[in-house]
Every structure is written in C-alpha cells, then in structure tokens.
Amino acid sequence: MALHFLFMQPVTTIVEVSQATGKAYNTIRNLFKAFQELGLVVEQTLYRRNKVYRFQPYLTLLEKEYSASGAS
C-alpha cells in the first residue's frame, strides 16, 4: 500500500503515508529506512522532523519522459 501511495504522491512525508495507508508511523518509518537502503526513496530535507522524501526512481523516469516528449 505504501508503494502504491508513492506512485500517486512521489514527494511525501512519513506522516502522510501513515495516514493514507492506516499504518502506524513507526511501521512506515521502518519501511522508508528499507526503501532508502534500496535507493527507492531519498530524503529531500535535512531536518530532524517533518522530513520530506522523494520516490526518486519514479521521478527520474517521469522527468525523462517529460524531456523526451519535447516539453520545455
């Protein structure tokens, strides 16, 4: 469910994913730690709280597709 949410909202916080999926904050935090180790999410902020994460492989793919379509 969390991965599905990331496809819909590729820039998000743990709180947003937790609320959207109905899973505990700690569960999503641990999942995001695993996702970070796999290179699926990248922390965008350097703050201790309210960290923002990017679903980087998906965003990279979207950016390539956008560039290939000739859009400026």
Image (cartoon, rainbow, N blue to C red):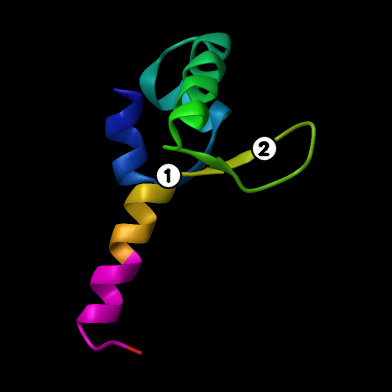
Residue in view at x 37 percent, y 21 percent: 21
Q: Which mark is residue 34?
A: none
Distance (Cα) linking label 2 and label 1: 13 Å
Residue 42 spot, x, y in % from top left: 54, 42
Amino acid type, label 1 = Phe
Question: Is residue 2 depicted above or below 52 in this figure?
Answer: above
Snapshot quadrant of residue 5: top left
Residue 54 spot, x, y in % from top left: 50, 46
The residue pinned by badge 1 equals 55
Residue 53 spot, x, y in % from top left: 55, 41
Residue 22 painted magenta: no
Left/right placement of residue 1 relative to residue 56 reads left
The residue pinned by badge 2 equals 51
Which contiguous range is marked in magenta? 63-71
Give SS at disc 2.
loop
Left/right placement of residue 53 relative to residue 50 reads left
Instruction: State the residue in front, 61 or 23.
Output: 61
Left/right placement of residue 43 relative to residue 63 reads right
Amino acid type, label 2 = Lys
